[in-house]
Image (cartoon, rainbow, N blue to C red):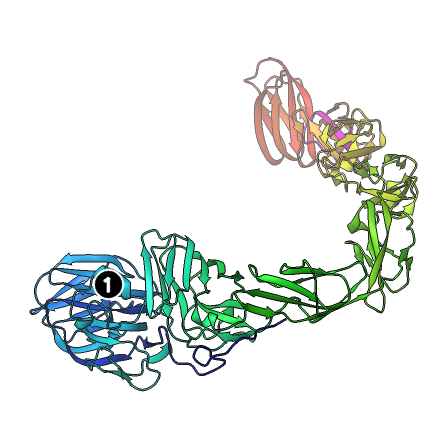
Amino acid sequence: MKIFTPIISALFLFVYGSVVAQGSGKMLEFNGSSSYVNCGTINLSGSALTLMGWVKVDQFNTNTSQPGANIASLFGEENGVPTLMRFGDGGALAYDRLQFVIGIGRSAYKLNSTRALSTGKWYHIAGVYDGQTMKIYVDGVLDASQTQTGSITTNTTFQIGQNYNVARTFNGEMDEVSIWKAGLSQATIRNYMCKSVSSTHPNYSSLEAYWKMDQTTGTSLTDHSGNSHTGTLINSPTRQTSSAPIGDASVHNYGSPALIFMSHPNGDSLRATSISGAPTAVHMYRVDKKSNSSNFPASVSAVDTTRYWGIHYIGGTNPRANIAYYQKKNSFYGANSSCFIDLAKRANNSIANWSLSQASQTSTSLSLTSQNASEYILTFASNKSIYKDTAAAICIGDSIKLENSTSGFSYQWYKDGQVLTNDTMNAYKASQSGKYQLTLSFNGCVDSSNTVQLSVGQKPTVSLNAFNAICNTNGFDTLKGGMPGGGVFINPFVSGQLFVINSAGPGNHKIIYRYTSGNGCSDTASQILKVNPLPTVMLAPFTAVCEDSSAFNITTGFPSGGSYSVNGSAGASFDAEVLGNGSHTIAYTYTDGNSCSNTASQTIDVVALPIVTFRLPFLSRNVCEGSALFAINGSNPTGGIFSGTGVSGANFAPVSASVGTHSITYNYTDRTTGCKNSAQDTVNVNALPAAPTITQNGTELSATAADSYQWYDKDGKVFGETKQTYKPTRSGIYSVSITVGKCTSEISTEFDFDKTLSVSDIISKGYSIYPNPSEGKVTIEGESLKLVRLFDLSGKEVMQAEIANSVVTELSIEELISGAYIIEIQFDNGTFTREVLIRK
């Protein structure tokens, strides 16, 4: 068998060699504060002009004050009558809109774009004046236009990145800036926006200046138009590898592109189909030079140095396409006999590293699906793999799949150098020891894969003892019984030798035991481990009980036949008084016929009795027999019920209670818990003292002995007379009440007190009244006489005379009619009365 090896030609192939800037090459980056390019004086005068280039904004100028005024100058002339492209125009135009300005005579005519541009994105912009109309194109699409006539008269210093004032310095990147003394058509702009300008350009004779910006060093900027408008870099604009989509040839599709196609003169081509994301346009470009980067994966042995391709989308939402490269007519491909090829890709020219795309390969094409904007290059691989390793070991009865990722070739498999008859696909299932290899060919291209040495070993004898059924608990079950020892147990719920019971749950679980022998071969045995469900156990909820509730037995567990515990202690009796208030756990455990147990639990809350106090006020603790009904106070909390002898509702009636000590009970029920409690106090009902008796001793009255007294006359209480004895000042009806303890007796029988002195008193004191009866005058003798008063028998006072301590006084009664009268004589030691008769 003859195997061809790749031919590496210095004309077409480089391997880790030096590179030069290709494609979009370099670009200039402006700092937004001071850097720009001075291109010297360029005469822009004439009846037609086009200014265009690639622009990517890093940051817009949002400074609204002059001289910045939201303006960022791109390229043109603004010293004198301006002609230029720029962003913004103070309050007249937002900072993210383009403005095309031309100077005619002494006037500046401005055309404002309508489209807002974004930062971080490349745009191809063009300002076109054809003597009749001013136009602005963005990415080849007409954005704004206006009628304008006259000849441009601007002829001053042309600058890139800044004009008029440092405050208008552009912040971002630019590439491929050019000046044309012609009004370029839209078709021409589209045809050349993604490729470098060459002499084939239809307006090449009108090219005034062309700065590719591809230089890598120095402070000058070469003009490639041949007109020597060399620019000078001011304040160091930086040279960076450009990411703009620029090649040596390009095609485009505007409108609603569904596909785009581009060929090389050799006949190889790139196609983009099934374009999605609704882009406005698609540009496909080709760079007819070797790549500017040689950074390829290690598996790449050769790279096409004659061309690479790129796709650029305009607009749309995440636009993508299916890519197919038809390599068969590529002269570089034809010069290499290797059949293992791929497309390397990168996002754009600025990316240093290419990566393999793993394109699907046939004898005619390499294809990829759903590709975003990228660049592609043909590569040749040295890794002709049919398996991940060069050797493999399997066991009897097993196999491995050997496969090459290509398709559409002629294939032949070999084992130990011998043809495997009829095995002519790109994949082979190997199950026997030996060395395997694949050859693939088409059109004279023959390649051999690497070799894979396969070893086949004997499997061990493996057994596993049966398992006993277990219950669905929260624990683990240690697995045993696998032979030979040292194997592993396999099940989704196994960790090491532990079977996680509660994760597995009830049911039959297949446990696999795998043992691997020293030759790497393994076998398995399996058994079913049955996990029985736990019985369903229920315990009905309990209502709260009061701490004085009677003890009771718990019987609500289901199924019956289980056992109870209270707070962890076995037993079904619940005694609230013993357990005390608080929450108590009741557990009910039941074991079924599989010896599986389960427990249900509930809590019983023992509620403390309400704290009840009852203390009668001091004055209510001792009352008298017959006292008035009074309200019972001193209970807390309020809202309870009183009971006891003499109790009526919330009142105590001493009249209803007998004399003695009586207990009053206050019962209170907590409305929230329903628990009851009570408190007691006593009230003493004291007997009333007997009504007192009054005795007279001379002019003094005396009552029965007691603790306190109150004397009364015919008008009621005699205020201040609260002693046992009382000396009335005049005759009359008197009574007294006495108090023993706090009880007051009834008022005594009325006592008729006569203030008149007795005959013996009068005689002993020397008092006399004469004559009696009298016919008109009465003489009164006695010591210390004060006052004489005379009353008729109806009690009406008919005469009064003051005597002023006389011993003898004479009273004239001549004016009185005949009859009986009462004479009252007051003296220092008392009063006496006597009946006097008047006769005429």
In the image, residue 418 lies in the stretch drawn in magenta: no
Q: Is residue 97 visible?
A: no
Q: Quadrant of residue 373?
A: bottom left
Q: Is residue 190 visible?
A: yes
Q: Quadrant of residue 111?
A: bottom left
Quarter placement of the C terminus: top right
Q: Quadrant of residue 309?
A: bottom left
Residue 560 position (above or below residue 484)? above
Where does the image place residue 686, in percent across and percent down from the top left?
82, 32
Q: Local crowd at mark 1 within 10 Å, few (<14), some, or many (≥20)?
A: few
Q: Amino acid at mark 1?
A: Thr
Where does the image place residue 447, in percent across and percent down from the top left?
59, 70
Q: Nearer the viewer, residue 627 or 730?
A: 627
- Mark 1: which secondary structure? helix
Mark 1 lies on residue? 188
Residue 572 position (above or below residue 87)? above
Residue drawn at the location 66% of the way across and 21% of the way down:
771
Where does the image place residue 691, in percent across and percent down from the top left?
80, 26
Q: Nearer the viewer, residue 32 or 659?
A: 32
**Magenta residues, start to end:** 721-746
Q: Is residue 789 left or right of residue 552?
A: left
Q: Nearer the viewer, residue 198 or 565?
A: 198
